[in-house]
Image (cartoon, rainbow, N blue to C red):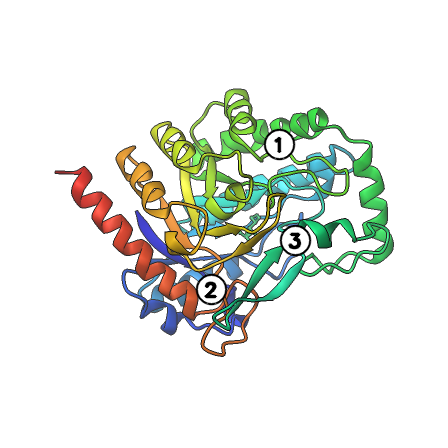
Amino acid sequence: MKMTFRWYGENDCISLEQIRQIPGMTGVVTAAYDVPVGGVWKEETVARLKALANAEGLEMEVIESIPVHEDIKMGCGKRDEYIANYCQNIRIVAKHGVKCICYNFMPVFDWLRTEMYHKNADGSTSLAYSWEDFQRIDPNNLHLPGWDESYSPEELQNLLKAYRNISHEQLFENLVYFLKKVIPVCDECGVSMAIHPDDPPWDIFGIPRIVSCEEDLDRMFAAVPSTNNGLTLCTGSFGAGRSNDLVHMAAKYAAQGRVHFAHLRNVKWTDDKDSFCEVGHLSAAGSLDMAAIANALVANGFNGYVRPDHGRNIWGEDAKPGYGLYDRALGAAYLNGLFEAAEKYNNK
Ligand code: DNO
């Protein structure tokens, strides 16, 4: 595996110099943030990001994300134009050495939490999702943290309304339509698409989500069989869904050669409904068996990119929630240990 770290480009308060000092770090996971969703990326931006990373001895082989325009997800408007732009972006990043693109197909919202600074017993804070708090949210008056603030309240309402008429089946067809156009470009350029699962892995506000469980993945891979149609195994996202067996999923999709990227973090289920809290990466801190997941990946030939996902805010750090330096660096060190042991004992 190759250990990587998410870096939000030159505006990130965490520097490449700090990232390179984390043991075992081989590269950054980043994106161009200067073109609106759906547009064609500027090649000079991609080249600059790569040059900056390389100057610190870090690779830039993973992009997270090239976002998918809502017209593509809804199958309307200018979807063909946006897909053509997407293909163009694949070619541009491939030209600069990128091997893997992480993206998602979640309507309107990316990850969703009800609390950004949940206070833990040890004084650290982390992201959390409370089933009870979620019930109190009025979808017509949304002020939830963590969302793309680029929509006006009116645009958001219109989008939500439009999605209420889209079924799971239609959304799935729109995903397949997209993949049938982009995967051949990936095959040609030697790039993998790694879809990020729904976070949390269930429908919200009555709008469909279709990348939440094994069954969803199986039909997506069956529809477009190239192994460049692959997965970001995000343990925290899938792991919030209690019926997802992460060890089994890691083994199964690694054996199929579809796990190109792994976001590794732990979550703790905090009630008997859907509530969960993000915790430190260690297995003992939460509900997932991180050692068994790392072992399942390695034992099944996983050879992709890993990054420590969301950390807590610790040691007084006040970083972008989930994306501070300290706890993610601790997470990387811990994950390096798990992989070292798994690789050593599986290759005996
Ligand atoms: C959250 C991230 C996601 C991810 C996108 C991929 O912390 O893992 O926002 O980047 O879903 O498109």
Name above or below for residue 267 compared with residue 183. Answer: below
Residue drawn at x 45%, y 34% as measured from the top left: 245
Three-letter code, disc 1 = Phe
The Cα atoms of the two marked residues, 2 and 1, are separated by 29 Å
Some atom of ligand 1 lies within 8 Å of the CB belonging to the residue at label 1 = no
Residue situated in front as seen by the camera: 277 or 208 = 277
Name above or below for residue 152 compared with residue 240. Answer: below
Q: Which residue was labeled with disc 2? A: 48
- How far across and down, in percent of the image, does residue 183 sit? 51, 31
Residue farthest bottom in this picture = 316
Three-letter code, disc 3 = Ser
Q: Nearer the viewer, mark 2 or mark 1?
A: 1
* Number of on-image labels: 3
The Cα atoms of the two marked residues, 2 and 3, are separated by 41 Å
Q: Which residue was labeled with disc 3? A: 130
Question: Element under label 2?
Answer: helix
- How far across and down, in percent of the image, does residue 159 sit? 81, 44
- How far across and down, in percent of the image, does residue 279 sit? 48, 58
Three-letter code, disc 2 = Arg
Give the mark nearer the N terminus: 2 vs 1.
Answer: 2
